[in-house]
């Protein structure tokens, strides 16, 4: 992250930043305003990807 509103990418997961909602969006539609928590959730989502 170079700017506070950059998307957070971990592996194959990217959580885009919504300036309207002022937070990062998860695939489930949750808004996370804490960047450290958003990165942790992106990491957990990346680790749960099943490769076929």
Image (cartoon, grey):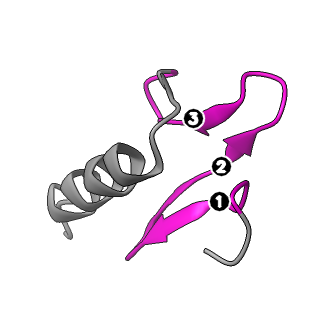
Q: Residue at x 69, y 45 (%)?
A: 17
The residue pinned by badge 1 equals 7
Which of the 4 quarters of the picture holds residue 10? bottom left
Magenta region includes residue 47: no
> In this view of the protein, which residue sits in the foreground, 40 or 52?
40
Please provide the residue range marked out in magenta.
4-29
> N-terminal of the two: label 2 or label 3?
2
Q: Give the CA distance from mark 2 to mark 3.
A: 6 Å
How many marks do you count on the picture?
3
Q: Dot 3: what SS?
A: strand
Label 3 or label 1, whichever comes before in sequence order:
1
* CB contact under 8 Å: marks 2 and 1: yes
Q: Are marks 2 and 3 in contact (CB under 8 Å)?
A: yes
Magenta span contains residue 20: yes
The residue under label 2 is 16
Considering depth in this image, is 34 or 9 the residue closer to the camera? 34
Q: Which residue is mark 3?
A: 25
x, y percent for residue 52 = 19, 69
Q: Position of residue 33 (x, y in %)?
A: 52, 32
Secondary structure state at the residue bearing disc 2: loop
- Mark 3: give few (<14), some (14-19) or many (20+) Cα within 10 Å: many
Distance between mark 3 and mark 1 Cα atoms? 9 Å
In this picture, residue 37 sits left or right of residue 8:
left
Q: Is residue 36 above or below residue 25?
A: below
Location of residue 15 with respect to 27 vertically, above or below: below
From the top left corner, tell me how far across and down residue 5 is, in percent.
Answer: 73, 54
Query: Could you tell me which secondary element the residue under label 1 belongs to?
Result: loop
Residue 35, horizontal then vertical, whole percent: 47, 50
The quadrant in which the N terminus is found is bottom right
């Amino acid at each position: 992250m170079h700017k506070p509103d950059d998307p957070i990418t971990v592996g194959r997961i990217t959580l885009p930043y919504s300036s309207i909602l002022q937070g990062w969006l998860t695939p489930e539609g949750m808004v996370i305003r804490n960047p450290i928590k958003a990165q942790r959730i992106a990491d957990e989502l990346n680790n749960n990807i099943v490769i076929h």
